[in-house]
Every structure is written in C-alpha cells, then in structure tokens.
Amino acid sequence: MEELAASTASDEVRFVIQSGGTYEWWNDIIGGNAIQRWVLSSGEFLLADEQPLSNMGDAKTLGNFLSWGVSSFPSDNYMVIFWNHGGGSVSGVAFDELYDNDSLDLNELSEGLSMAGAEFELIGFDACLMASLETAAAIAPYGNYMVASEEYEPGEGWAYTAFADYLANNPTADGEDLGKVICDSYYQKCAQTDNDAMATLSVVNLSKVDALINSFSAMAEEMSGVSGDIDTYRSLISGINRAENYGGNTDEEGYTNMVDLGDLVMNTQDVLSDTADEVLDALFDAVVYNVYGSSRKNANGLSVFFPINSDSSELEGFARIAPSAEYVRFVEAISDWTAPAETVAGTEAVDSVSSGDYEVDFYTYIDEDAFYTLVIDSGLETVESVQFALYYMDYEYNEYMLMGYDNDIEAYWDDGIFLDNFRGVWPAIEGCYCAPTLIAEEDDYNLYSIPILLNGEQTNLRAVYIWDSDEEGHFEVLGAWDGLDSETGMSSRELIKLKDGDEITLLFYATDMDSGEQVLYETDSFTVSGEVVMEEIELFDGEYLYTFQIVDVFGGEYVSEAVILECDNGEIYIYETEENA
C-alpha cells in the first residue's frame, strides 16, 4: 500500500483494496474488526466502504468485493491482484488468520471471480506457488492474462510503484504488456535485495489454456499407457522426479508437490514421444513471458501437481480441482489411491506396475582399493536414485549424529555399481559443520536444505552447489525459509536473507545407539558479518558411519549395511562394522 501511494497519480487509473484476514497490520492505515475497502486518492488511502467481518478465504467474500468494485468504479479494463500467502494448486490462496487460516481453493477462487460481473484483463497472484496449470484453468473463463510465480516469493512481493507508474503513463496497456512490466520490475526488486536466485514470475495468456489442457490430457493418457511396463514406468517417474520442483521438498520443510510442467515434459520426451512436443508447443504458446533466477533455470512458467509425497486427503483435494480427468486417472494409478468417482467420470481405470511386483536386492563390500562398493543385482530397473548418509559416531554419548545426505558417489548405472567418494571433507558454513539434505539434483546445480536456528528460531537454510566447470564448483547460501504450515499447506512468504548481526546455530539430529530415540542438538554458532561462506573443510578426527541410500520409483527406500570410515590426522581408514563383518 505504501508503494502504491508513492506511485504517479493518474485520473485514468484507480486502485481499490479490500483488507481483512489478519490479527495485526504493519501500517497505521487499516484498523477495526471489519472488512474494509480503500481507494487511493492523491497519494492517500481513503476508506470507501466497510462491511461486517467475513472470511477472506470464502468465495462470497471475494465475489462481493469484486461485484462492488466493478459497479462502484466502472472502467474500460479491470485487474485483480491477490496479495497474501499461497500454497499451490491444492491449498490455494488468501489464508485468513481469523478463520483458522481458511483459504480460497481453486474452485472457490473460480466461484468468486464469476460473481464480479466483468472480465479481467489481468489476474495476478502476488503470492507463493500459484503459477500452475490448475490455477490457470480455474481462472481462464474470467480473465485474459495471469501473472503468478511457480516458486515462493520474497515477503516484499511485487514492485508496486514501478508497475503503477507504468499504468499511469500507459493506461490503455493490455495484460501482456503490463504483465511483462510486473515481471521485470519484480525481478529487479528481487535482485536489489539479493533474492533473485530463486525468483520466478510468468505471464500466461489465458485464452491459450484450453488448448494446453487438451494436449496435457492427451499426454496423461499416454503416461497411463506406458505405466504398465517397468522400463518405461521408471523412465517416466524418474524424469518427473528430476523436474524442477517448488516450495518444500523435505519432511522438515513440508511438500508442495508442484513441479515445472515444461521440465517434466522435456525430461520424459523419450517415453512420451506421441504427445510431448504438442504439450511443449501449447505451453510455450500460453506462457508469453517469464523471468527466473540462477537457481531456477528450468522454470518454464507453469507448474503442475505431482504427488512427490501426498496423503489421500491431499490427493482427493487435487482430484476435485484438477482440469484433466485423464491426469487424475494417472495419479490414481501410481499412488495406490482411489479417486472420487465424479472426478474421473468418462475415463477408464489404469493398470500400472506396482511395487509388490519388484524388489531391489543388493550387496556391499570393500574392494581392493578400499572403496565401499554397492552392487544392485536385482531390481535395478526400478531404482531412481542412490545417495549416501554420513553419521558421526559419538561414543561418549552413545549416539549416531547425522551429518547429512548427498550424491557425491561414483556411479556406474549400466552395471548397477556404486562406489563411495569419501574424501574426509564435509560442507561447513563459516567454518561450522552443517547437516545438508539434498532436495534437488539438476544438470548444473544441487539444492540443499540445512536445519538451523536463526536468531533463536528454528528454520531451514537454503544453499546451492553450482558447477562452474566439469570438475569445479562452489556453494552459495541463498537464505532461510520456514517451509509449509503442516496444517494448512500455506507457504512461508519469506526467503529470509541473512544480514549482519544475525545469529546462526547449526542443528544436528542424533540417534541413541541402543534405544533408537532421536534428539535434536544445537551445535556451533556464528554471527553473520558480510558474505556467508559455505565450503568443504576437513572432518575432525573420529569414526563415521557411512551407508548407501537407495530409492526406487515407487517411493521405496533401502539402506545398505554400514561401514566405518575413520579420519585420523589426514588419513582415511575403512572398516566393516561388527554387524557387517
């Protein structure tokens, strides 16, 4: 609101705002236990209307505001912007603190827009995770263009002064031109606050969405057709899981289950040869503009729901807002879940391979060159990823302390052979060891989540390892992110940039060797001063437990027997454990 108030005044452009849904406001303008409506005039917001308190996550609250605005302020063109938290296709947008964080799901969003009595030139979401195929389908009947982000957005959001100034000087601009200004000014604002690495924002021509849904539904039928053969199933699921995903992707952060549609298709073209090109053509026809940061290079403008980690409740919620019944059938087939009958009417059930038909068998040994070696001798066709876990063996406290997970191994996939690449080093931030979890593996970078305390509050640090060449690379610390609300699915709006004076404490999980109880420990701390450096440093002397972690395309997880890797004055020794000997 302050940014809008600072923009150029224009007799041809008017901004009207409805406020509600929070216990506390960060300005001195809004007050009272009511729904309030404001009009910007000569740099000040004037109260134009007040209604009894109602749920901002209810379709009628939205529809009443839009119909009031259209009738009270008739115009040649209308734009509506949702500023709040977003949670992706299933959780929706506009979470109301006063009503148990209820939100507008996509069906409610569509219903509210339908009550406006006008078509919108642009529908914008200054909220996290809303640039999805499902969102575009829900709003397409009511607007010409959509502007939204696939990824979470920084708390300061869009650059309102910049695009309001553009409108003042170009009041007849269409949604595409205005959307491009919103994207460019937003990205520039992110860059100025060092939030650009994870930034995404796109402009979607909503008139092209029907064609995209039709081609996507045809692809979903092809996906269902290839899911009955294990080789094509593995290629398909592995390709989807490699696609760039947004929001959370760990138990600590939560799961949004949103993946980039373009990256998904490009990763699976080999098995979806009949329909992939048509989907990409339709996608790039619909997405007329998008911006993305260095750690989101595979963002193509629209995401789609895919069950990376979903329960039946979330899957049912998705089915009820999904624009493609054929895709719901595919999700049903790979999820061991039954879709509500009305969501798949007119389609046939799909037969798919299942985990019960396959099992991964493997063995390990220490080879003559002292490499710990994993051999997968059965079920390799179902294996999607092989990583490792490293634990420090703290004999004083009788605990294993998890150092983290990574994919720094020598992999020979054709033969099913994997060797450790342990070098006696580990990632550290400002010289303090950390516990990274690998959450995304891309061609030119890895993305990690690291548990920390930031000024005494538990959160997760986001860091990226970028390959500068075939063999060299470097870490960058992007900031802290609180993740998703476990109850509502609401995404934290803030990628918190670290600033001078911040106190960082690294967190580690440890497991009792006898009882199996898990404890969260606070370890080393540092105060931020200047650029935060993350790099590999030598591990301190001691014994470390090393295991391979195997994940198959059905989500099954396998853990190898462990070996002990001892670091002693710069030398590394490897031993079998007593259980493994």
Image: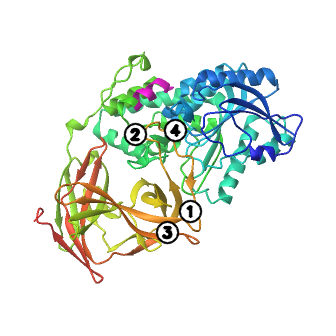
**Amino acid on which disc 1 is placed:** Leu
User: What stretch of residues is rendered in magenta?
Assistant: 314-323
Could you tell which of marks 3 and 1 lies nearer the N-terminus? Answer: 3
- Main SS of residues in magenta: helix
Compute the Cα span from label 1 to label 4: 24 Å
**Amino acid on which disc 2 is placed:** Val
Q: Residues within 10 Å of mark 4 (few under 14, many from 20)?
A: many
Q: Which mark is residue 469?
A: 3
Residue closest to the eye, 115 or 16: 16
Q: Residues within 10 Å of mark 2 (few under 14, many from 20)?
A: many
- Front position among marks 2 and 1: 1
Judge left or right: residue 35 versus residue 490: right
Compute the Cα span from label 3 to label 1: 28 Å
Q: Quadrant of residue 395?
A: bottom left
Residue 379, given in percent of the width and then of the height, sits at 22, 46
Which residue is most to the right? 11
Q: Which residue is mark 4?
A: 87
Residue 470, given in percent of the width and then of the height, sits at 46, 68
**Residue 210 in view here:** no
Could you tell which of marks 4 and 2 lies nearer the N-terminus? Answer: 4
Compute the Cα span from label 2 to label 1: 43 Å
Taking the spot 12% from the left edge, 63% from the top edge, the residue there is 580
Could you tell which of marks 1 and 4 lies nearer the N-terminus? Answer: 4
Residue 479, given in percent of the width and then of the height, sits at 53, 59
